[in-house]
Image (spheres, rainbow, N blue to C red):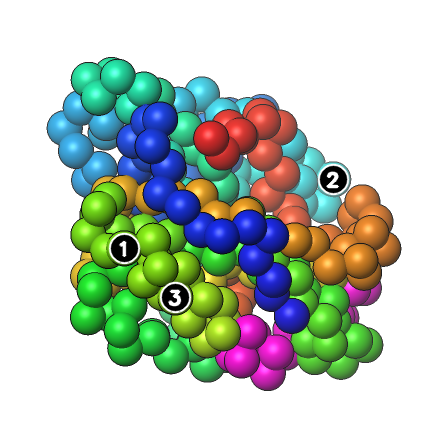
């Protein structure tokens, strides 16, 4: 069950913008990025900075039959820009998930998940949310426990009272709780994973648009103490599991 640790409040000290994006890259035999393509633009000032950041990434080389090879990976990114003085921003790459590129003519056997229903009042108020959920799965991949991690409410500051902000976030949590508790991740179970980190996005319009975001704190459930290194799987917002072969050696940025 997802439990808020405190009442939700708008951040007042600085502005935070967040965006999601995707693309593909090629990892050369040395683990360097040799090709890079984004599926969208994040703005003419941001694009070259982001390209330079990703182009400098280093990966553990991909091997086939014991030899390093070129490997193509599709990626999904979560970006964050912090504006301390409203004029200059710090660009952060806070999440990067890598998946296999689609194979022409091949029927994908990925997990299909039913997304949560968008709360009507939050939709009318043009509020969105990003929830990062920790789940515990059984041997078949069925979700048996879930717990919230630090997440985000998206919307214009001052557009709603604090009471309605809290109500909107609680509606997002209720919708997420109801949906995720019915999900199954057989691919992760087959890999021997017992836990997974699942992003759940509620977005109005294109999710690549930069949006004002405000942090929300969650109380972790006691069972999360059972999570061991290497036993935590990762999935994308569509339920597909990430490819553990693509191991990024660089550290991602911390969320502010």
Q: Quadrant of residue 171?
A: bottom left
The residue nearer to you, when weighing 165 against 190, is 165
Name the residue that disc number 2 marks: 66
Q: Total marks drawn?
A: 3
Position of the N terminus, as image quadrant, is: bottom right
Quick check: can you spot residue 56?
Answer: yes
Rendered residue at 53%/80% (across/down) = 178
Q: Where does the magenta region start and end?
A: 177-194
Q: Is residue 118 left or right of residue 171?
A: left
Name the residue that disc number 3 marks: 167
Which of disc 1 and disc 2 is earlier in sequence?
2
Q: Quadrant of residue 195?
A: bottom right
Give the image location of residue 74, x and y in percent. Answer: 43, 50
Q: Is residue 98 left or right of residue 163?
A: right
Residue 248 sits above or below residue 171 on the image: above
The kind of secondary structure element at disc 2 is loop
Residue 50 sits above or below residue 10 on the image: above
Q: Is residue 87 magenta?
A: no
Q: Of circles 2 and 1, which is in front?
A: 1
Q: Is residue 30 left or right of residue 202?
A: right
Labels 2 & 1 near each other (Cβ < 8 A): no
Q: Is residue 181 magenta?
A: yes
Name the residue that disc number 1 marks: 161
Quick check: can you spot residue 73?
Answer: no
Give the image location of residue 29, x and y in percent. Answer: 57, 30
The kind of secondary structure element at disc 1 is loop
């Amino acid at each position: 069950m997802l439990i808020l640790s405190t009442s939700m409040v708008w951040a007042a000290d600085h502005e935070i913008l967040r965006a999601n994006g995707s693309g593909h890259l090629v990892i050369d035999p040395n683990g360097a990025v040799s090709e890079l393509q984004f599926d969208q633009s994040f703005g003419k000032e941001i694009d070259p900075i982001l390209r330079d950041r990703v182009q400098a990434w280093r990966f553990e080389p991909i091997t086939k039959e014991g030899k390093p090879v070129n490997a193509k990976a599709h990626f999904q990114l979560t970006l964050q820009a912090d504006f301390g003085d409203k004029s200059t921003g710090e660009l952060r790459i806070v999440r990067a998930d890598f998946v296999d590129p689609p194979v022409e003519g091949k029927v994908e056997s990925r997990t299909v998940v039913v997304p949560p229903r968008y709360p009507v009042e939050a939709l009318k108020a043009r509020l969105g949310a990003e929830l990062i959920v920790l789940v515990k799965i059984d041997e078949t991949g069925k979700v048996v426990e879930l717990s919230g991690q630090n997440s985000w409410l998206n919307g214009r500051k001052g557009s709603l009272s604090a009471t309605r902000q809290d109500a909107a976030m609680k509606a997002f949590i209720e919708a997420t709780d109801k949906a995720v508790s019915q999900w199954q991740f057989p691919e992760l179970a087959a890999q021997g994973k017992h836990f997974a980190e699942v992003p759940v996005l509620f977005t109005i319009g294109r999710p690549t648009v930069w949006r004002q975001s405000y942090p929300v704190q969650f109380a972790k459930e006691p069972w999360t103490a059972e999570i061991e290194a290497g036993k935590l799987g990762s999935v994308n917002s569509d339920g597909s599991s990430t490819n553990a072969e693509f191991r990024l050696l660089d550290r991602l940025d911390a969320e502010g």
